[in-house]
Each structure stands twice: as C-alpha cells, then as structure tokens.
Amino acid sequence: MESQVSKANILNGKELSVAILEQLKPRAAAIAKLNNDNPPGLATVLVGEDPASHVYVRNKRRACEKVGLTNFHYELEGNTGQAKLLALIDELNCNIEVDGILVQLPLPKGFDYDENEVLAAIAPTKDADGFHPQNQGALMQGTEAPVPCTPKGVMRLLDESGMQGSGKHAVVVGRSNIVGKPVAMLLLAQNFTVTICHSRTADLALEVSRADVVVAAVGVAKLIKGEWLKQGAVVLDVGINRGDDGKLVGDVDFDSACARASYITPVPGGVGPMTIAMLLSNTVEAAEQRLGL
Ligand code: NDP
C-alpha cells in the first residue's frame, strides 16, 4: 500500500479542552465565592446499563471534579419509566444548586421513554446540552441560548484553523438534531455557505470535493476518503466508530485525508474531549447568568 505523507496540521482537541477547563476553574471559584461557597452544579442523569453511556458520564463527572463543579449524579434502573424520570427532572429544575442538567442519551429501548418529552422537560436555562426545543429555536433565530456541546466544540476547533466563513463553502455530512443540524446553523451564522448531506445524498464525494470545511457526523468508519477532499480543506471529524481492530476511528479516513487537508481533527483526541469542555462551559455560563455576572 502506498504510504501517505502527513501534511495536515492536527487540531488537538485534547490539549485545547485541557486549556478550556483550566480557564473555567477561576470562574467556578468566583461563583462559589459569591454564592455561599456553592460552585456551579451539574446534574448527570444516567438511565440503564449502556456501557458507552456509563463511560461518557464517568468522563463528564471527572471533568466536573477537575474544574471544581459540584456534580449531582443519579443512576436509574432501565425500567424506571418516563413518569419517574420526568419527576426527577422537575426536582432538579427547582433545585437552586443545580445550574445544568444532563440526561445521557440514548434512553434504554423497550420501555416507554420519549426522549423529546424528556428534553423538553428540562428548564431551558439549565439545558447544559442545548437540546431543549426552545434553545434549538434560538439557534435557528441566532439569539443567545445554550448551544449543543459537540457543535460548539467543533466551532471552537474550527476557530483554531483560522478559516473564516465569508466566501467559503462548508459541507456537513449528517443531519441529526444533536450534531449535523446545529453545526450547520452555527456555520451559517459565521457566513459559510452550507450544504448538509445525508444518507440520500446522490454523490457524497462530489459534495465533499467542493468543501473548504468538512464536518463529518455520520457514524460510518472511514466513510470520507482523502482523495475526495479539496486541497487545503479543514476537516472536523465528529464520528466515533470501532475499527476492525477494535480501535476508535472517525468517519474520515485520517491517513489519506492528512495528505490533502490543511487542518484535521484526530479520533480520538479531537472533537470528543471538546464536547465535555463545552458541557462544563455551558454549566458555568448558566451559573454566571443566574447570578447576573
Ligand atoms: P445519527 O445516527 O443521529 O445521524 C447520522 C447521520 O448520518 C444521519 O443524518 C444519516 O442520514 C447520515 N448518514 C448515515 N449514513 C450515511 C452515508 N452513507 N452517507 C451520508 N450520510 C449518512 O448520528 P449522530 O449525529 O448522533 O452521531 C454521528 C457520529 O458522531 C456518531 O459516530 C457518533 O458516535 C458521533 N458523536 C460524537 C460525539 C463526540 O462528542 N465526539 C457526540 C455525538 C455524536 P439520514 O438522516 O438520511 O439517516
């Protein structure tokens, strides 16, 4: 096999997220000082036994500890049911020590859970994940509101590349409510001309070849090939997939993409750690707003 010479600059989300978490520490401490020694609080709600969800929530809780946020953690049996879950959210909405609420998705299959109803039950001001319909509407309108964490992290990494939106074309592959659609709105707000691709797109390679910025949020290992990319494209890979060898890989074929991209995020160590940093950032911002800072 021909070996590719790596030319792209790596957008290191792991390092950047550490720096962002460091910057949050004094803000959390300042809030505690003003608030009877209570730092910002993040409630994490985990329902069921999904191993990946347990890992994600554990990492979020560890980050809270590092930054000095209080973590209120709830683990519910898979069969807890919608009514009890909604009652817990109601309780957290009323708890003044809780600034952010995160219900880890997906909720267990085979029970009566309605994820949309759960997300809509979270108080919009405590919506650390930015998934409440009111906050998604605010994103459409370009008004101030919590922004979903992964898209916010993607935009922060894009900032590092220095790429500006005016006159540039961004292609987002994937149209989910949690990644594809919000990231497309954020790119549009920064004056990119945006194309959203999905499973019914006729010629994905052609669409990607026109992009100055590619955001891949699909969930198919190495779907996007280096030879599809425009020379100098910025590539932001949201995908987390297990490769044949059991290792984590993105939606972009990293080795071939490095030969064409100007900047690229690795998997792991790219977008993933940024998601957690943005979750904590949303929680600290919510606490600052509550205190009028
Ligand atoms: P979804 O499954 O909700 O959405 C996937 C999207 O990809 C859909 O819009 C789907 O199209 C599209 N798609 C599927 N196959 C193709 C294809 N062959 N060609 C073009 N488009 C395709 O996934 P999510 O948005 O939730 O997540 C996407 C990836 O990002 C996953 O790997 C996930 O694990 C990862 N992820 C990573 C996070 C992080 O922190 N780094 C956070 C969240 C997600 P259609 O709508 O037509 O079905």
Image: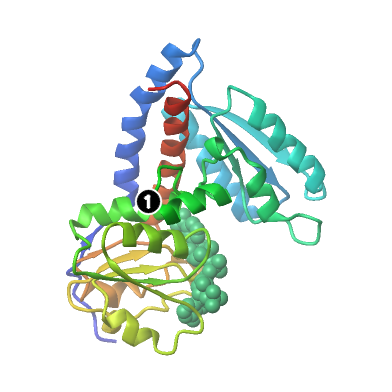
Secondary structure of residue under mark 1: helix
Residue placed at 21% from the left, 69% from the top? 168
The answer as to whether callout 1 falls within 8 Å of ligand 1 is yes
Across and down, in percent, residue 9 comes to 19, 61
- Foreground pick, 245 / 41: 41
Q: Tell me the amino acid under the disc marked 1.
A: Gly
**Quarter-of-image position of residue 217:** bottom left
Number of numbered tags placed on the structure image: 1
The structure's colour scheme is rainbow
Q: Is residue 34 above or below residue 170?
A: above
Q: Which residue is mark 1?
A: 153
Q: Is residue 290 above or below residue 182?
A: above
Classify residue 164 as left or right of residue 198: left
Q: Is residue 271 visible to us here?
A: yes
Quadrant into which the N terminus falls: bottom left
- Foreground pick, 45 / 293: 293
Classify residue 290 as left or right of residue 111: left
Classify residue 254 as left or right of residue 242: left
Residue placed at 47% from the left, 60% from the top? 179
Classify residue 103 as left or right of residue 273: right
Residue placed at 81% from the left, 57% from the top? 111
Across and down, in percent, residue 96 comes to 59, 22
**Quarter-of-image position of residue 116:** bottom right
